[in-house]
Amino acid sequence: MESIKQEQTTTVKVYREFFTKAQAEVKRQLAELKSPSYCHKCRKCCKIRYSEFSPEELKDLGYEEFLKTFLPLGASDEYSTVDLQTNQYEAFKTDSEYSQKVIDSSDRDIWFYGCKYFQTGVCKKNKEKPVYCSSYPMNAYTVLHDWCGYEKWQRECLDKLKNQMAKDIMEKINNIDEYKKQFSCACCATCCKLACSEFSYEELLDKAKNGDNFAKQFTSVFIPYEKEEEAYNAFGEYIDYLRETLPEGEKTYFYHCPKNKDNLCTDYENRPEICREFPTNPLMILPKTCGYSQWREETHTDTLLLHALVEIVDFYIKKLESLI
């Protein structure tokens, strides 16, 4: 059990590192599409911009430079405080349509800020703009003002994400799936002797009746163990791992296939898709006896990176599609 626990701990750590690096790389590639020429000089971003962080939170996060330039709306100077209600009231006075648009885009409290150097339509720091001015918008999914020229950048980002990045990721995932064909089942029958689910057999049957395809396939093959001790004999190390890591009160149900005899399937030609495609990805926990364990070991790291990229690219695409 310790070996599985250690491996999963390492996997989580590596995934977090990959996620951070992948996020920075996606952001870098999208930033390369951005051009200052897109700015229409409308100055709306000088009068009002937003953050999901309060002035106090921005200070704690190290954004003092931002607060030296942008004051929370409703505050008379950088030393005075303002509550959220007053801040949003002043935002609606400044630009009601934009304020509502921003608030509707988030499920968090939104704070609005304005540049203290922008007065009567003129920027007093025009020749030495702070970085938060020259680099606006900081993110491709920033909610923009109507007619902002950077909407063109957002459209270019969406196009790159959908037609280049996402396709490249899927191609690499498909290559890993294709590589799997070089390996074959070693007939250890662990996948036949032990299948796990968070749902009881009765719940799975109900799901199958309601059209759940996976539940249909699962219940057509697997039946529950009468005693957990019987399941333990199939892959005890994995069951120990589940017992230790599952949240308190969360139950796992163990199943087996009655068609397994002497580690061979008695209905092999008619086995369902969930059997034919097992293991579906290199992130699954497999015993060393599995014929696909080498495939998992060789592609595990690449798969972690690709899954991180899938999450990030999908996040950007959904955000941008909701804005454009």
Image (tube, rainbow, N blue to C red):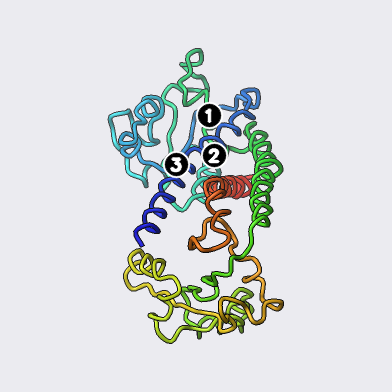
Residue at horizontal 41 percent and vertical 55 percent from the top? 8
Closer to the camera: disc 2 or disc 3? 3
Q: Position of residue 69 (x, y in %)?
A: 40, 25
* Mark 2 surroundings: few (<14), some (14-19) or many (≥20) residues within 10 A: some
Residue under circle 2?
A: 142
- Report if the CB atoms under discs 2 and 1 are less than 8 Å apart: yes
Residue linked to disc 3: 17
Q: What is the quadrant of the N terminus in the image?
A: bottom left
Residue 184 sits in quarter: bottom right
Give the residue at x 53% y 36%: 139
Residue that lies at the very extreme toward the front in this rendered image: 262
Which amino acid lies under the numbered mark 1 shown in the image of this protein? Tyr
Label 2 or label 3, whichever comes before in sequence order: 3
Vertical side of 211 occupied by 66: above or below? above
Left or right: where 231 falls relative to 274:
left
Find the distance from the CA under tag 3 to the CA under tag 1.
27 Å
Picture coordinates of residue 110 (x, y %)?
A: 43, 45
Disc 3 and disc 1 in contact, CB within 8 angstroms: no
Q: Which residue is mark 1?
A: 136
Q: Residue at x 66, y 75 (%)?
A: 272
Which of the 4 quarters of the picture holds residue 278?
Answer: bottom right
Using the numbered discs, state the Cα–Cα distance from disc 2 to disc 3 in whole angstroms. Answer: 25 Å
Give left or right: position of 176 versus 56.
right
